[in-house]
Image: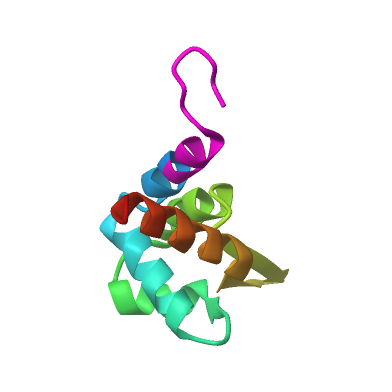
Amino acid sequence: MDEQNNISEDIVRLAEIAKAMSHPVRLYILKKLSKVDACCYSSDIVDELGIGRSGLSQHFKELKHAGLINAHVKKPYIKYCINKENWDIAKKLFNDLFNE
């Protein structure tokens, strides 16, 4: 807990997660990955969204930084999966927020 402003670690973590989720493309990625029991290749999502690879790569980077997804590299391909442990934490933090 930040003693100066009484902000708990959970609130800081929730803010990091919310920031990572603050773009429609990232929400699309999370929704897609959370619904499948497998990983997706980035090329599949590029084709679905019709956005450039470099832009999509930046969105994946933000989601990875927040710990919401994992990347599995098997050159020349990268598969992305939801990080189930951190996804469950995110759901709990949002539920706690909305149920207070």
Which residue is depicted at the point 41% across and 40% down?
A: 15
Q: Which residues are magenta?
A: 1-14
Residue 62 place in picture, x, y as percent: 48, 49
Residue 2 seen in the figure = yes
Q: Nearer the viewer, residue 16 or 27?
A: 16
Q: Is 12 on the left or on the right of 95, as rendered?
A: right
Residue shown at the point (56%, 47%) measured from the top left: 65
Pick out the residue farthest to the bottom. 37
When the figure is inspected, residue 65 is found, relative to residue 9, above or below; the finding is below
**Residue 46: where, in percent of width, then height?**
39, 72
Horizontally, residue 31 falls left or right of residue 64, namely: left
Q: Could you tell me if residue 55 is visible in this image?
A: no
Q: Report which quarter residue 78 is drawn in.
A: bottom right
Nearest the camera: 14 or 74?
14
Q: In the orientation shown, which residue stands out farthest toward the front?
A: 100
Q: Name above or below for residue 99 compared with residue 48.
A: above
Residue 73: image location, x then y, percent: 70, 68
Which of these two is toward me, 12 or 38? 12
Of residues 64 and 74, which is closer to you in this image? 64
Q: Quadrant of residue 29?
A: bottom left
| Residue 99 on the magenta span | no
How many numbered marks appear?
0
Q: Residue furthest right?
A: 74
Is 33 on the left-hand or right-hand side of 18? right
